[in-house]
Image (tube, coloured by chain):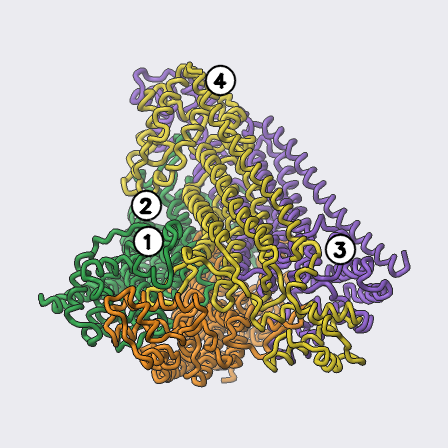
Chain colours: A orange, B green, C yellow, D purple
Amino acid sequence: MSELLRKGRLSHVRKDVARFTSSAKDDERLVRHIVKINKAHVIMLAENGIIDTEDCKKIIEALNKIDGKLELSPEKEDAHMAVEEEVIKAAGSTVGGNLNLAKSRNDQVATAIRMNLREELLKLVETILELQDALIQKSERNLETVIPGYTHLQPAQPVTFAHYLVSQFDVLQRNIERFEENYRRVDLCPMGACALATTSFPIDRERVAELLGFSGILENSLDAVSTRDFLLETLANLALLAVDVTRFVEDLIVWSTSEFGIAELPDEFAFTSSIMPQKKNPDVLEVIRARMGILIGSFVSCATVLKGLPSAYNMDFQEVTPRLWEALQTAQSCLSMLSKVTLSLEVKPNVLEKPSLTFLAATELANMLVRNHKVPFRTAHKIVGALIKTLIDEHKSLNDVTPTLLAEISDKFLETPLDVNVEEISISVDPYLVVKSHKTKGGPAEQETRRMINARKNVLTASEKWVWEKKDILEKTDRSLDAEADKILGKG
Amino acid sequence: MSELLRKGRLSHVRKDVARFTSSAKDDERLVRHIVKINKAHVIMLAENGIIDTEDCKKIIEALNKIDGKLELSPEKEDAHMAVEEEVIKAAGSTVGGNLNLAKSRNDQVATAIRMNLREELLKLVETILELQDALIQKSERNLETVIPGYTHLQPAQPVTFAHYLVSQFDVLQRNIERFEENYRRVDLCPMGACALATTSFPIDRERVAELLGFSGILENSLDAVSTRDFLLETLANLALLAVDVTRFVEDLIVWSTSEFGIAELPDEFAFTSSIMPQKKNPDVLEVIRARMGILIGSFVSCATVLKGLPSAYNMDFQEVTPRLWEALQTAQSCLSMLSKVTLSLEVKPNVLEKPSLTFLAATELANMLVRNHKVPFRTAHKIVGALIKTLIDEHKSLNDVTPTLLAEISDKFLETPLDVNVEEISISVDPYLVVKSHKTKGGPAEQETRRMINARKNVLTASEKWVWEKKDILEKTDRSLDAEADKILGKG
Amino acid sequence: MSELLRKGRLSHVRKDVARFTSSAKDDERLVRHIVKINKAHVIMLAENGIIDTEDCKKIIEALNKIDGKLELSPEKEDAHMAVEEEVIKAAGSTVGGNLNLAKSRNDQVATAIRMNLREELLKLVETILELQDALIQKSERNLETVIPGYTHLQPAQPVTFAHYLVSQFDVLQRNIERFEENYRRVDLCPMGACALATTSFPIDRERVAELLGFSGILENSLDAVSTRDFLLETLANLALLAVDVTRFVEDLIVWSTSEFGIAELPDEFAFTSSIMPQKKNPDVLEVIRARMGILIGSFVSCATVLKGLPSAYNMDFQEVTPRLWEALQTAQSCLSMLSKVTLSLEVKPNVLEKPSLTFLAATELANMLVRNHKVPFRTAHKIVGALIKTLIDEHKSLNDVTPTLLAEISDKFLETPLDVNVEEISISVDPYLVVKSHKTKGGPAEQETRRMINARKNVLTASEKWVWEKKDILEKTDRSLDAEADKILGKG
Amino acid sequence: MSELLRKGRLSHVRKDVARFTSSAKDDERLVRHIVKINKAHVIMLAENGIIDTEDCKKIIEALNKIDGKLELSPEKEDAHMAVEEEVIKAAGSTVGGNLNLAKSRNDQVATAIRMNLREELLKLVETILELQDALIQKSERNLETVIPGYTHLQPAQPVTFAHYLVSQFDVLQRNIERFEENYRRVDLCPMGACALATTSFPIDRERVAELLGFSGILENSLDAVSTRDFLLETLANLALLAVDVTRFVEDLIVWSTSEFGIAELPDEFAFTSSIMPQKKNPDVLEVIRARMGILIGSFVSCATVLKGLPSAYNMDFQEVTPRLWEALQTAQSCLSMLSKVTLSLEVKPNVLEKPSLTFLAATELANMLVRNHKVPFRTAHKIVGALIKTLIDEHKSLNDVTPTLLAEISDKFLETPLDVNVEEISISVDPYLVVKSHKTKGGPAEQETRRMINARKNVLTASEKWVWEKKDILEKTDRSLDAEADKILGKG
């Protein structure tokens, strides 16, 4: 524990207790933010006459020295005290002793976490965009690649690989929306809330927020130090993302089995067995799937920790933040790897050749009976169902349907047996023609999917613009904070 | 299982299996939405010449009959088949047999859930607004009610009850934002996606969406039937709300202990023990706390169910929806009860009388030393810390500080002992004056909190307007769907 | 709220508050246990001279009247007060007013939950045994049914269906162990702990425990009323069971896809689509899978509720119990359905015919090279791996391996090319012979699996005996409690 | 990826993919177990004539060299391949190439995890025993330290600190039971299951299990490589432990508030604020509480990962193990710290002095009316309730009860007002006498708690013996494995 805080109210702390409760190790990523916060804070103090400009200058010089070079041992209480200690060492206790005037670790740590989370959310959105881009690239090359669509893991109707990839794009888009909305709630500055009640010094909270590039302040001071909802929301959003990504990966794992045989991972993404020489295992997909599962537990961990706490700051908060960074890192690296996998995926040729897959056209056959022969849909459904049962019992496929067979079977369901011609049948049961005919909005027909892809390219551009604007704000803020500091240092 | 679907592909199903998999019981709340969807669907089919207007008329007549009166026994497969059976019974199989033309249970159930969820989200937001309103009402009457602010459950600094209540308002406001954002993603119509691949009939998806009051369609058809992210997002948001509400309730439980003695529940909200006659237990708060905990598990249940599924429809989806309604109902009833509790809460008189609570002013005493005597803050912190240690050892309070004592103690930390006058001390240690001096933005001073309350009244009005507009859209949609149906029935 | 407890310390409670906090609806299943507890309690009080035998008689008469016929409206506080009210109504307030002497709702509810949980755990174990029995029956008929064994969902080595089913038996056996161990911790009586501190009356806790068929008392009184670990352990065990059952069901779902085509559900367990007539969906398996997922969330719900609570009784406990019963009911019905599915499962003929599955023998081919030709295993692994790569590239199967091809390929890895004869190859690549050769303990060879099945039959019998003995204790206890009551009523 | 496995079936793997999927970093703790397993395996192979003794000797020499010195870079696939590579390097490919004969990574990793988990479970039980020992030590010194017992966080009845500490002992004891039961299921050896189907080589699975100190083999080979239930059970048990520990810690946090003022942490365990000099925060307890919350999420993470997997080995397993070690480490360090806190805890003097706490005796006052004045308990409960209401309204305590006041109040509930003498009252309302009178089994009376403590000392000894015996087996096994290896090396 920092000696700065002992010998007044409390005597020494046990070393093992200090090590046990220290957050020093996990604080490393926060140091540069804490330095910035301290700069912004003392600039504001000086601007408002709360400290002398000369003192402010000395403090900024001290802060400039430690930037990036602070060592945090587990004996240190945390990064906040370590920075303050360095400043006092460099600027003397008379000047440096006022560094924590009109602020507290409570508002400072909340601010530093939000600053780091802004950057991490932008990185995360960038990795999602990378994956969306891969999906778009791949889909453009697969507009006519017909694959079986499944429900209940049973062959349902033919779609295209492009149609499927666009659906994954849209799933991700909703995740991006959620992270953007989350960002807005993260991008508010708690500084000036101090311990929980603001201060009696005439500080300017908006100025500090501006110097740190926040879109505004988190107003009510009790709220500002109490809440960790902004990061729990991130973890909830990561859990939602994890569910979505797992479903995509699960599809790929199933499709790359030798039984489904729809897609194949290139060798460079696959592994074999230490004992079974024939194996080609999709380890990389399984690892992504598993890590996505871990994310759901991370949300539970943090929700459980926060749930029972009384309002305002509790030390429990400290244990939540490392899980946030860990979860973000997991999501980023998995999505990035998944982009590479997506780009490398190829649909195998002839995936529709299996006899069982001819039944994918069954709905269209029924539709044809409705359209051409005025059979009510529910009856057409039964006729085709009975037809398929017969075909399966006789080890045949839908390609074996004849007008005679249809007539025979329809006889049980209709007053007059159907009189369908060969061409009607052959058009209905050709999966490529079936896909072509499904040109309803949102459907798999080539021109419709192409339209969707083009629209999504604009969506992608808009998201990229959003990220770019936010990054630009953060970079400009860094430069302008340096400029303000330089002004005080007389370097301006 | 509905006989409509048997005897074609499949023979009979076992009764116990049918009962086991049936969703009939949980579908009850969806029936009226399913009826509307079917109406909108057949109107669109007729408008686009896919079915005859006369057939459309008969189907609408049949649908009008069953509205609200459909009995769902556990032997029925689900509400979708039950509605279709009724229509076929009333309109005959030739006409009614086309009810499911160009649609599927997959898009229909997703649409019906979204329609019901729209209503439930609006109800939920209304109950949050009810609580926010109670917080505002209560805070206006407690602008000068000074209470101890705690961190780590240890007395920290004085705030006011109003200041605290406004912080809870702000917490809830972020939840409202999340539910509004969620609403936008719920308010999209999957109809026309059919099983997963749209259809070869020339349907008009936007028209159906319009007739059902959706803001647009959920475009990609695979996505439209695959995703349950919209409801998992609701459950995630409920989990986030649960964490927030629990923290508020936890405060109230702790504050209503005889030891903290800050607030008291009126008798009409409290319970006693069956054996200990003196007990006055806050059962109602404990029940809310517990039910909030349940909500976190509901999210986990549903995330776990959805996580492993391949894309497109899987029967597992069916098990998720009942948990959604249950969770929403729990949240609504708990928030509604919490509004009543909030309105009834009173802060006890003289809550600051305990000697231990005089130390709430310690930070301000240190601030005064900085302000008036140019002591660096870190040194002032140590002096006041050591002062308090002495006072506690002597069983004294901060009211017992004298200039002499301060001089004595400061001697260990400063070259010249402090020369503080009595008035300086008495101003610093009076918690009411401390609160008054904390007029920084977001702080507890009366005028600042009053300003915040006024701003929040506008926020509340805006939220109410949002709910009102959405409800208005839904009501108008219902009326216009009826009007369209009447037009076809010749009643227009 | 019960009027019995008002008008002393507290005035009236609001009706809406009473309804909100009431556990009456969920208490229904506890009524018969509460009646028994009250009987046992007053018999003990009379035996120890704490109440008169005559009063005891009147109370027992009153209790006998209400047994099973008590109506619990949501206006009632809970079943405990409802029973006490009935007794007071029937026996008068002078006699009945002592019913709650030397006990409390706190120990009573904990005891009633434990009594009900004993029964439910036995029912649950019975349903697991039902499933184990189905697995054994099915495995006996499939000792020679060779199926592909998978790892990473990729074909690995041939095993038998019986071998697989025995592995599922063993998984379940560990679950049974856990529930039996759990039962021992449930089967302890909290009665006499009263509110939390026992009582000053000279009660006999062991006697009450004996009259209620417990194996002992839960000694420390604070512990006895504080802990809900016994039921959280049940929920944890259910979550573990859920993970295991889901994996079994997941296998069956994958195996019953048309692509894997290993097993098929009979029609009477399957469902079709409302739009796609060819579909045969394994809804029943998907529903089981989903409900298992729900169980994991139930554990989280209850752990979250209990986690933050201070020791001793808190009202939050009340919200946990309904989730326990719900979870047990879910598990019981799903396992029971799964037993029926298991009995109906058939492995399709010719499952090994697919060319890709010939590679299941690859490890054995490598083993043969080690055994017959002294090739180090790691080299043999590479040779066979390269061999398979060649075969796949040429669209061939392992049946196409010739001595020449092996010699050619081995040339790259060995100094002298391999000289393998045709018979060596044909023995190695025949999956039926491979299975026969795997007669190591725990392996798939017929005689070894038969040995395992026989051993498991004994395990099954032992488990059945355990259940039978516990049920017998509970039944005998009921009879002897009645006999003790009759003695006091003079009927003995 | 290890080159040992490439160039046969698969060509090169991408470096980023290799790094992404590598478990090398997390495998470090498994290396020494993997070395032992390999030794035991080759000894068994040699004993059964499957490899030459001379080859066995060379392999053991190679294994001896790498023991503890193996470096695992993230480029390595995993520890298993790294060990094999080292052996091949040292012993040559002809000899070393047979190291993986008749085994696989699948059985080897499951075995190594079980070996490490055995050690970790023993360490964990030891830390629980350390805490139990602290509880016993502390309780012996606090047999007459009367403290308020709470329910619903409201004062309920007086108990003693010793009575409370014993209840915590008992809670922990049930956790120990669960971990011991878990240990039995961990202590089974999967070796010989190979990839999933055993092997055609005549191996002796029991011999390997014996050489590694297991109590037996995990028989069915599919089960042996498929199951991770043994470690999920550990995680479930840790979650149960976490709930229990949190409740204990929550008590201590509440008790150490200045408001409750029951216990105080010594300075050396406490921290102050960076801004509020008066603060003395129980950070160490809050950190323990938070880390316990994390454990619940760890279970969820791993259950979620495992839940959806098909049977047999999947790569997802790899992601689960690091969470297991992390969770065990968290639990061990937190419990160890909590032991130190427990030993340092002191109950403050005069904790019963607060007027509100006099009502702790209310139940006993009611009991006295039943015992001495034949008032039915339910009526006595009302009289005392009304009495307390009067006292509170008049700002009085239970010490202010007089015979006259009791008579007055009882008049509303009884036909004849009560005639109670002063001594009866004073005995009933003295919390020290109340505690003395609660000598029922499990109660707080000094002699009864002393009896419980003595009994628990025996329980503690038995647990310590259990740990000692298990550790002894593991140590003896290590020595005997070395001896067997030495025999082959000719050193025996």
Helix, strand or loop at label 1? It is helix
For disc 4, the chain is: C
Q: Position of residue B30 (x, y in %)?
A: 28, 58
For disc 2, the chain is: B
Q: Which residue is mark 2?
A: B346
Q: Which residue is mark 1?
A: B26
Q: Position of residue B387 (x, y in %)?
A: 54, 51
For disc 3, the chain is: D
Helix, strand or loop at label 4? It is helix
How far apart, in angstroms, are the residues tagged by discs 1 and 4? 52 Å
Co-location on one chain, circles 3 and 4:
no
| In this view, the mark in front (1 or 4) | 1
Q: What amino acid is labelled 4 in the image? A: Glu
Residues under numbered marks 4 and 2 in contact, where contact means CB atoms less than 8 Å apart:
no
Q: Which residue is mark 3?
A: D204
Could you classify mark 4 by the number of other residues whose Cα lies within 10 Å: few (under 14), some (14-19), or many (20 or more)?
some
Q: What amino acid is labelled 3 in the image? A: Asp
